[in-house]
Image (spheres, rainbow, N blue to C red):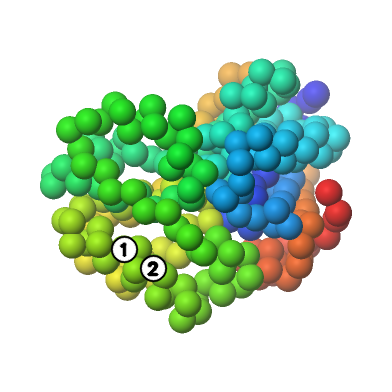
Amino acid sequence: MTDNNPIGLFDSGIGGTSIWKEIHTLLPNENTIYLADSKNAPYGEKTKEEIIHLSIKNTEFLLNQNCKIIVVACNTATTNAIKELREKYTIPFIGIEPAIKPAALHSQTQKIGILATKGTLNSDLFYKSVEQFKNIQIIEQIGFGLVELIENGKINSVEMKELLNQYLNPMIESNIDYLVLGCSHYPYLIPQIKSIIPNTIKIIDSGEAVAKQTKAVLLEKVGLREIDKISSQLFYTNANPKILSDILENKYSVIQKIF
């Protein structure tokens, strides 16, 4: 393992590219390999055992690509499987969890909303995070159908708008002042969300914090890449490569691979 080995990232699909973009912005000289397990999306509807199995499979793929650190760019996989991954492998893992803490600490109305998958909201890790803030009313909403629409390239569809209205309006009526996005797919919905919620409600996602943590762990345990040539950004998917290419604005080549 050398400093020049790539950062590996995996998600249940294309959503984790929102995390990849933050990491690439902060660490543009690092090589990266992104794995989109879109064939098995969404993870949020699967059992804990299934999520662990898929997370191990994705990790093995990235380890075979000689990754020096792995970012679990999926809230559901982090909250259900990162403990098992850290016990099984020696490579450092970076997880992604809903950013409950900053929302809870800064809320003036003492009410925050969280839009996340069923797998994240039902996880032990999420429960432990919420338990710290008993004075805050947390309005949870499972984002049924959102990941599937994003994975099918329907971010700006009528169906998406209808679902978001259905999920967000009760939160607005409850007087939340922070909305936490608890799925790495959801930052791609921010323009639609902003068209529904008042501008007094702040939106929080975990991308920037994950990027900073990735840099910190690299500096502490592995090292940053030596700058000798242009960095390499590889993307793999086991579904339609056009969907992943489109979300990346067709700036990078996407390799379709069965895994």
Q: Quadrant of residue 106?
A: top left
Whether residue 231 is situated above or below residue 197 in the rendered picture: above
Asked whether, in this view, residue 107 is left or right of residue 24, the answer is left
Outermost residue, bottom side:
158
Type of the residue with mark 2? Leu
> Dot 1: what SS?
helix
Whether residue 59 is situated above or below residue 26 in the rendered picture: above
Return the x and y of residue 176 as percentages of the image width and height. 21, 53
> Dot 2: what SS?
helix
Mark 2 burial class by Cα count in 10 Å: few <14, some 14-19, many 20+:
many
Return the x and y of residue 145 as percentages of the image width and height. 52, 64
Return the x and y of residue 183 as percentages of the image width and height. 49, 50
Specify the quadrant that holds the N terminus. Answer: top right
Residue 32 appears anywhere in the view: no
Report which residue position mark 1 lands on.
Answer: 168
Whether residue 98 is situated above or below residue 132 in the rendered picture: below
The CA span between labels 2 and 1 is 6 Å
* Total marks in image: 2
Return the x and y of residue 199 as percentages of the image width and height. 23, 64
Identified at 53% across, 56% down, the residue is 185
Type of the residue with mark 1? Leu
Mark 1 burial class by Cα count in 10 Å: few <14, some 14-19, many 20+:
many
Identified at 79% across, 57% down, the residue is 238
Asked whether, in this view, residue 99 is left or right of residue 93, the answer is left
Report which residue position mark 2 lands on.
Answer: 164
2 and 1 marks in contact (CB < 8 Å): yes
Asked whether, in this view, residue 198 is left or right of residue 9, the answer is left
Asked whether, in this view, residue 104 is left or right of residue 49, the answer is left
Q: Quadrant of residue 200?
A: bottom left
